[in-house]
Image (spheres, rainbow, N blue to C red):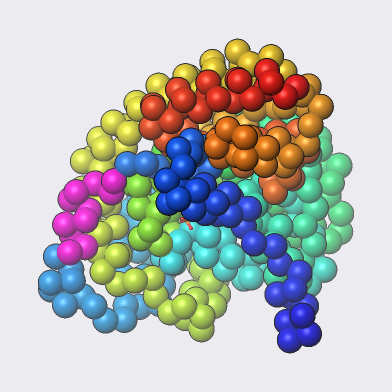
Amino acid sequence: PRFLSARAAAIQPSPTLAVDAKAKALKAEGRDVCGFGAGEPDFDTPEFIKEACIQAIHDGKTKYAPAAGLADLRAALAEKYFQDNGLASCDPSQVVVSPGGKFSCYLAIQAVCNPGDEVLIPAPFWVSYPEMVQLAGAVPKILETGPENGFRLDPEALRGALTEKTKLLILNSPSNPTGAVYPPELIRQLVEICLEHGILILSDEIYEYLLYDNSEHLSPASISEEAAKMVITVSGFSKTFSMTGWRLGTLVADAPIAKAVASLQSQTTSNATTFAQYGALAAMRNWEQAMREVKDMLQVFDRRRLKLLDGLNSIPGVNCVRSTGAFYLFPDIRDLGVAPVEFADRLLEKKLVAVVAGEGFGSQTGIRLSYATSDDVLDKGLARIKEFVEEEY
Ligand code: PLP
């Protein structure tokens, strides 16, 4: 298409959103689809958060807000990073609120990457990272990980991938798509290597509160003051508080980086929706209540996780790691001798079960299933997958 820029022509649409759209379209036709594709909690946003947003609209909070976010919200987030994530200090000037964690990631990459810079991305990765890196003219370098090490980046593999051009490492723990959680000791080792070589880290912690089996989340920026200068921490409200549609993401970085991110935002989207930020502020100000709701949600997720894990592992040729974060499992199907994308397409076609093929995440052997779905769908979907595998492979 001759009018498209080289950038636009090169970009791939998000495969996770595409699967979800396809499943929803089939559902709308009245077909009985079991959807494991969604990257969002199936719970509603907590009532008190919704009320605060509605109240903000009634109070006329319907105008522009400061580009970097409401001052009160930035202050509350700075406090959270100090209290909850263990940063030695966090000033509100280091915080930027954006329209979604996805945009926070995009701005972070735009803020620090020059054309030709290399960005290290452990695979399986969240689909948007390589595209965002390329949009900045930088070069994604993919570091393979596999089920044998729980889909976690090996420090030696990191060392081996470093070159003069390496600018940034992207870490995402808990991970989308694998659900892997990096243990604190591994985070420390990886951060140490990056600091030694002057490499920045983008730490995407959007699933930071979705943890099971007593696994622990460590924010790389909390390791040392030096680390705090080199780590850009992204998170948001979407996954923790079931607020995917609100479009609210957060970024914390060394003040000069945060300032650059805020400038980029001020010239692109301006602020995240003003009244939505008041909902988020209510979550921050009523943290204990908000966390109680998260805990309730986690109990349900955990039960479903174990059900899905057992169900998948009972299917011959399917092998699934017991991941302890987010709401995804990433079973390995290599023993079935079929490419994930073909498996996923046929599964949807033949059995109306939607899963996301690994290829979009940089995996040739896995598929992603989200357990942020009802028990009914889990039971029915698992039975259909089992039937499908028995019939086809
Ligand atoms: N980072 C990861 C790893 C994600 O999975 C997602 C959402 O799917 C995001 C960031 C962005 O979430 P949002 O833009 O809804 O805040």
User: With respect to residue 14, does 61 lie above or below?
Assistant: below
Residue drawn at x 39%, y 27% is 376
**Residue 3 seen anywhere in this rendered image of the structure:** yes
* Side of 312 relative to 147 (left or right): left
**Res 9 → quadrant:** bottom right
Q: Nearer the viewer, residue 12 or 77?
A: 12
- Magenta span includes 47: yes
**Residue 233 seen anywhere in this rendered image of the structure:** no
Quadrant location, the N terminus: bottom right
User: With respect to residue 203, does 96 lie above or below?
Assistant: below
Residue 284: x and y in percent read 27, 52
Q: Which residues are magenta?
A: 44-54
* Side of 313 relative to 286 (left or right): right
Residue 77: x and y in percent read 35, 56
Residue drawn at x 34%, y 71% is 273
Residue 127: x and y in percent read 65, 52
